């Protein structure tokens, strides 16, 4: 699967011929859809990219280990390079799972109707953060649920939530 880096140095590098053979075996002449290489050097994953990728009919995710991909994989076999954040993990398996989960919950039928619409970073919240949530008990150790949420006045509740969301988003 991997080999020593040309030019020397530590670590092993995932071979381009091996990845090309895997793609050929899976897709014949090559995939006719986006192939995402998970790499800390890629475009940083955000909700906009999740929405974009969730709109694709098919995706292939490539994960590496050790020193990473032979650069020709990223240049010639992948259509996208995606990072899940500015830190380095040991392998691309967890980044692939993160991307998979973020996309899967945006697919029709994955969540109850409407429950994914008002999440942090969603268009419904102008890309901002969601308002806080509370549940029973209404009082615990003197920590009270905001009275407006118990008022039953949905107009006031909407306004309070909108304001909370706005304040959190500009912090
Ligand atoms: C130890 S990392 C290689 C890091 C690489 N040598 C560098 O410095 O950019 C091994 C593999 O883990 C995956 N990986 C690690 N951190 C990642 C991140 N933040 N986002 C996406 N993939 C990551 C990638 O597939 C990467 O090739």
Image (cartoon, rainbow, N blue to C red):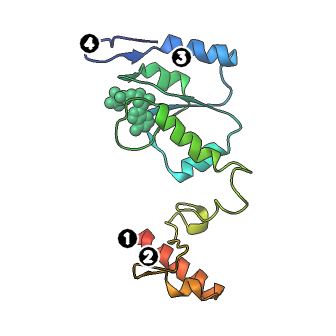
Q: What residue is pinned by disc 4?
A: 8
Per the image, the residue denoted by label 2 is 167
Helix, strand or loop under label 4: loop
Q: Earlier in the sequence, mark 3 or mark 4?
A: 4
Q: Residue 139, position in %: x, y?
A: 47, 81
**Closest to the observer, 54 or 148:** 148
Q: Residues within 10 Å of mark 2 (few under 14, many from 20)?
A: few
Mark 2 element type = helix
Distance of label 3 from label 1 (alpha carbons)? 44 Å
Residue density around tag 4, few if under 14, some if 14–19, many if 20 or more, within 10 Å: few
Residue 40 visible (yes or no): no
Q: If you read the primary sequence from the N terminus, does the residue marked by circle 2 or circle 4 appear first?
A: 4
Along the viewing direction, whichever of 89 and 30 lies nearer the viewer: 89
Question: In this figure, which residue is indicated by the disc labeled 3?
Answer: 19
Figure check: 96 above or below 113: above
Q: Position of residue 162 (x, y in %)?
A: 54, 78
Marked residue nearer the N-terminal end (2 or 3): 3
User: Which residue is disc 1 drawn over?
Assistant: 171
């Amino acid at each position: 699967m991997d080999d020593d880096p040309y030019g020397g140095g530590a670590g092993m590098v995932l071979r381009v011929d091996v990845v090309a053979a895997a793609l050929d075996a899976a897709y014949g002449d090559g995939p006719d859809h986006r192939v995402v290489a998970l790499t800390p050097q890629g475009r940083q994953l955000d909700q906009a990219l999740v929405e974009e990728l969730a709109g694709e009919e098919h995706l292939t995710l490539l994960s590496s280990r050790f020193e990473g991909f032979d650069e020709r994989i990223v240049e010639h076999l992948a259509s996208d390079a995606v990072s899940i954040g500015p830190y380095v993990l040991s392998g691309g398996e967890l980044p692939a799972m993160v991307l998979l989960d973020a996309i899967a919950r945006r697919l029709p039928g994955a969540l109850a109707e409407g429950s994914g619409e008002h999440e942090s970073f969603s268009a419904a919240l102008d890309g901002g953060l969601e308002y806080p949530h509370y549940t029973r008990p209404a009082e615990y150790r003197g920590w009270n649920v905001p009275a407006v949420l118990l008022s039953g006045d949905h107009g006031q509740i909407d306004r309070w939530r909108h304001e909370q969301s706005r304040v959190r988003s500009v912090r």
